[in-house]
Image (cartoon, grey):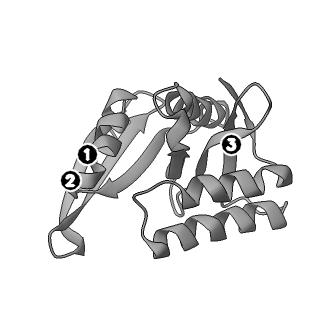
Amino acid sequence: MCIRSAVSKDRDAIRAIIDGAGNLTEAEEACAAELLDIYLKNAGQRDYSFIVAVDGQDAAVGYACYGPRPLTDGTYDLYWIIVDPAARRSGAGRALVEGVGNRLAALGARLIVAETSGLAKYEPTRRFYTGCGFIEEARVKEFYRAGDDLVIYTMRLRPYTESGN
């Protein structure tokens, strides 16, 4: 699976991946699409980066969006990682996580944070994160709404060091 930075020609494919994800709310789809447009229309911005997993014809079959966590040193958020349902279990998702990790390690990043819902329909997402080396760091009960926890995962890119605090 080839991983590369997303470019303008990928917009329609990424939008189709977002729309076809199958488990996103309308608000989540709108947010993911908005971040894509910010990335594609503002070359100088540094808040969001997008990479794509592409097939043999250079067509995007999955994407990841990530960016620096404000007010931190070397911590990045993995905002979105979505693979087209037809390409799931092909290694595209794992390749995207590795692509994000490699790019961030080259920047000297320390930590990647991924957040998801605690609802049962997100169990495959949570298994995916742990399968890729993330650890469940915390749960915030009923964060999104009654009965829907926030589950926070982290992946360390550099060894943990005691700060003395």
Q: Amino acid at mark 2?
A: Ala
Residue under the point 58% across and 51% down: 66
Discs 2, 1 touching: Cβ within 8 Å = yes
- Nearer-the-camera pick, 65 or 86: 86
User: Can residue 165 be seen at all in this image of the molecule?
Assistant: yes
Disc 2: which residue: 120
In this rendering, the label closer to the viewer, 3 or 2: 2
Q: Disc 2 to disc 1, how far (Cα)?
A: 5 Å
Q: Quadrant of residue 104?
A: top right
Q: Nearer the viewer, residue 23 or 5?
A: 23
Quadrant where the N terminus sits is top right
Q: Is residue 35 above or below residue 126?
A: below
Q: Position of residue 113 (x, y in %)?
A: 42, 48
Query: Residue 154: horizontal and vertical position, in percent?
Result: 37, 42
> Residue 40, position in %: x, y?
80, 61
* Residue kind at label 1, given as amino acid type: Glu
Q: Is residue 67 visible in this depiction of the protein?
A: no
What residue is shown with label 1? 123
Residue 37 screen position, x and y as percent: 73, 67
Using the rendered view, name the quadrant where residue 48 is placed: bottom right
Q: How packed is label 3: few (under 14 Cα within 10 Å), some, or many (20 or more)? A: many
- Is residue 153 rendered to the left or right of residue 86? left
Q: Which residue is mark 3?
A: 51
Position of 84 with respect to 43 (left or right) is: left
Q: Which mark is residue 75?
A: none
Query: Which of the two residues, 26 or 48, is positioned nearer the viewer here?
Result: 26
In the rendered image, the vertical position of residue 24 relative to residue 73, given as above or below = below
- Kind of residue at badge 3: Ile
